[in-house]
Amino acid sequence: MALFGRKTTEDAVEDERTGSTPAPLWRDEAEGATPATAEPTRRTLDEQRSFLLDKVGAMRPFGMQIWDVPGLVLCEDIDSDLDLPLVTTARTSGWGVRGSDLVGATETAPKRLFVVDSISVSDGPGRPLVSGAAVEIEEGAIIPEGVDAVVPARAGHVDADGYVVIGEEARLYQNLRRAGSELADGTPLLRAGDVLTPRSVAVLAEVGLDKVLVRPRPRVVVFTVGETLVAPGQPLTRPQQRYDAATALITAAARGDGATVYPLDIVPSQPGAVKQAISEQQIRADLIVVVGGGDMIRDVVDDMADLDEAVVAINRESRIAYAGLGDGRTPLVILPSGVISAYVAYQALVRPVINKLNDVDPLSATREEGRLAEAVAGSEGVTQFVPAIRDADGTVRPVGATDSELAWDLARANVLAVIPEDWSGADAGATVECLVLDDARVGAPRP
């Protein structure tokens, strides 16, 4: 059936033919916003995550061309509305007959049937076959009405009177590829919630569908604010400069989590420059993620959006700013500067938001238990995410110093060891939960 004739799983349907852009379902922004003059709110990790998740809903379903949908979530049930094959055809070249006309036929007592037609693959089905007649038919040709079996060509020969002489019986539907025998009208093909694959796209095309209703990838704009940062590939001209790894890291992480990401150049630490970047990108973003620049957020946002600033109890406490931009309340999240600090905040707070936009479990992640090989310092009331290596035997070894901000430490790690907020650090030998990074291999899953 056509896209808009199928039953959808959601009321809101957008079609790319209208030129409209799908948008997430943003929540009411007013509640919980921090007044511009207030001090940042102090929140636990769970409180801040709940605060952000309450601001967004899943992306609205959108009709897209099938070659653009691999990796997206299907938002409707798809059933076949045709038979495959569409018509009954011959599996072999031979004689199309009525099986009842060959009952009792043997080599010594053959049956004679008058040949009324010859049908090739390019022909139509021809006239209905009457009793006592046969048609010569080519492999793959459409079977005329009345034919219920095809006898192989070798089983018969034409005599001088134009009759085919057949010395064997025929089974019902012998050598026929019947209409609907491989896929019948009404067969369930795909279900709402399925993640579409190239093979799924082939199925859609096979039943004649060129569009399908999906949840589009959220569009995420990422940039970093800083005066001493330099984009990779450019020369360092001053000793205090360093290369920006955070933009690349957050961009790659968001793409891995199913977002379409637009990374920008480094934005100078000037309210006007940051505000301009946000204003220019807002039109194409479902989420804007900024690394650094939180100290100027009030000057940047002013009349642009409602603002919330929070000191969140993760990794030495991180300052997280949130704003809902414009009438659509496009969410802006400002993460702390520093590669590891930004990445931890992304994993703990931004990744759940992207998951919710994609209509998957916000907290979905691979987790393993492990035993600390050494003590980890911490503060009660603060959740610590420690880059570490988890061996196949479950031993967890932290990498890097506690105040490290090197991407190298993340590259060596395969997990983030989580020290809960109600612990004041962790002793060697303590069992901790580990968040598996990307597709890292960390040994056998726990039972």
Image (cartoon, grey):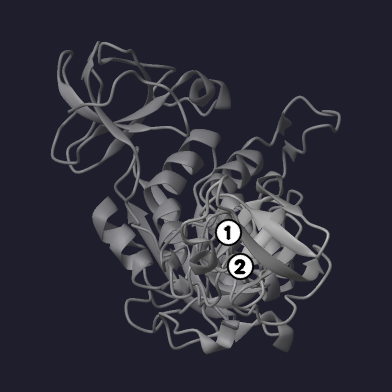
Q: In percent of the image, x 77 and y 50: which residue is there? A: 265
* Residue in the foreground of this view, choosing between 262 and 164: 164
Give the spatial CA distance, label 2 vs label 1.
7 Å
**From the viewer's perspective, is residue 166 above or below residue 246?**
below
Residue matched to label 1: 176
Q: In percent of the image, x 57 and y 87: which residue is there? A: 4
Q: What's under tag 1, amino acid-wise?
A: Leu
Element under disc 1: strand
The mark nearer the N terminus, 2 or 1, is 2
Q: Where residue 169 sits in the image (x, y, percent)?
A: 51, 54
Quarter of the image with the C terminus in it = top left
* Residue in the foreground of this view, choosing between 141 and 102: 102
- Res 127 → quadrant: bottom right
Q: Where residue 422 sits in the image (x, y, percent)?
A: 13, 40
Q: Which mark is residue 200?
A: none
Q: Is residue 433 left or right of residue 298?
A: left
Q: What's under tag 2, amino acid-wise?
A: Thr
Q: Marks 2 and 1: CB-CB under 8 Å?
A: yes
How many circles with numbers are drawn on the protein? 2
Regarding residue 362, the answer to whether it shows in the image is yes
Q: Which mark is residue 88?
A: 2
* Residue in the foreground of this view, choosing between 7 and 378: 7
* Circle 2 Cα neighbour tier, 10 Å, few/some/many (<14 / 14–19 / ≥20): many
- Res 273 → quadrant: bottom right
